Amino acid sequence: MPKITIIGTTTWGITLGVVLANKGLQVRLWARTEQEAAELRSAGSNPAVMPGVTLSSQLLVTSSLGEALADVKMVILAVPSQTMRQNIKLVKDYLNRSMLVVSAAKGLEIGSNKRMSQVIAEEIDPRFWSNICVLSGPNLSREVIRELPAATVVAAETQAVARIAQRLLTTPNLCVFTNTDVIGVELGGALKNVIALGAGMADGLGYGDNAKAAFMTRGLTEMAALGVALGASPLTLSGLAGLGDLMATCASPLSRNHYVGVELAKGRSLEEILASMTDVAEGVSTTIVARNLARQLGLEMPITEKIYQVLYEGVDPRQAAVELMAAETRHELSGRKWKLFSFLRRRRRSSAYLSTLPSSPSKEKEK
């Protein structure tokens, strides 16, 4: 039976450990300290993180990296994005050619402005780069751990590696799709958290579903614009790792980023909100990176800019909403240095070319 190791006792890390162990895999969950590992083993769960959840006998909790990473087929890093680099540094000496390295973090690194797969690649032996995968999709932990139906995407540079990861990660209630657009899958999972902050603000201000739908749609267009500029396919951003994750995160009260937005609309400070949370709202740090990338690329991303101003410059959410509504309007796919139109033109030229080709033999027979 394949063995899988999960680095990180986050909500998502524990969730993945539980559902994969329930599938029958041998799963090892690495805790940073022996005290934390002992508490998880004795309580069967972390009441502060996952109340009412018991750990399967197939799930071994350990604070020993050597024990956790011995003879495993896959290591999943379910850690906050800002700690990914220090965690992969701990893991890198245990890697081998047959071990997949999966990022389950949905964020971007402050300072370097890099995606998690890039952070991992910088720290590990280049021989293992082809084994890097990313996992992302509309996966609210508290639903997945209850084994409610869900779907997600695992992406790798090659379809062969993605399929190996798919087979390991698929469970009876978690449908795993594959993709080779690593950039798009990662950016979808990270950038939707920024938009979810704004959706939470809209809900907290009582703006209604029309405004929220418009906000989410415009947010998705910004996500696609930045994604295309960085090399992603816009089609990926319209899939599970983009639109799917955006819908779940913007709509659900289980979403941490949505919660932060709601609380900001109530007038609470960001520092107070974050201090009251046990989990990380990745959108708070990702907003900084997304804004930096947009400025470096010369992209217009007004929603991201306004979210940044609310988070870090003390702008009132109501004022930000008014300013967004008052912004100049034009074609909905146009923006400074956006490449969405050029993508559409390429698609139109391709369609025009295909229309000049002779019909297939089967079509000729039909005629």
Image: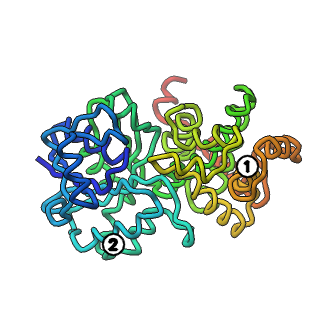
Do callouts 2 and 1 mark residues in contact (Cβ within 8 Å)? no
State which quadrant residue 151 falls in: top left
Count neighbours of disc 1 (C-alpha within 10 A) and say few if under 14, some if 14 to 19, many if 20 or more: many
On the image, numbered disc 2 is attached to which residue? 89
Q: Is residue 75 visible?
A: yes
The image quadrant that residue 263 belongs to is top right
Q: Is residue 352 visible?
A: no
The answer to whether residue 208 is above or below residue 63 is above
Mark 1 — residue?
A: 303
Indicate the secondary structure of the residue bearing disc 2. Answer: helix
* Color theme of the render: rainbow
Distance CA(mark 2)–CA(mark 1): 35 Å
Question: Which of 305 and 362 lies nearest the eye of the viewer?
Answer: 305
Give the amino acid at mark 1: Ile
The picture places residue 357, in percent across and down from the top left corner, at 59, 44
* Residue 103, percent from left and from top: 38, 57
Residue type highlighted by circle 2: Lys
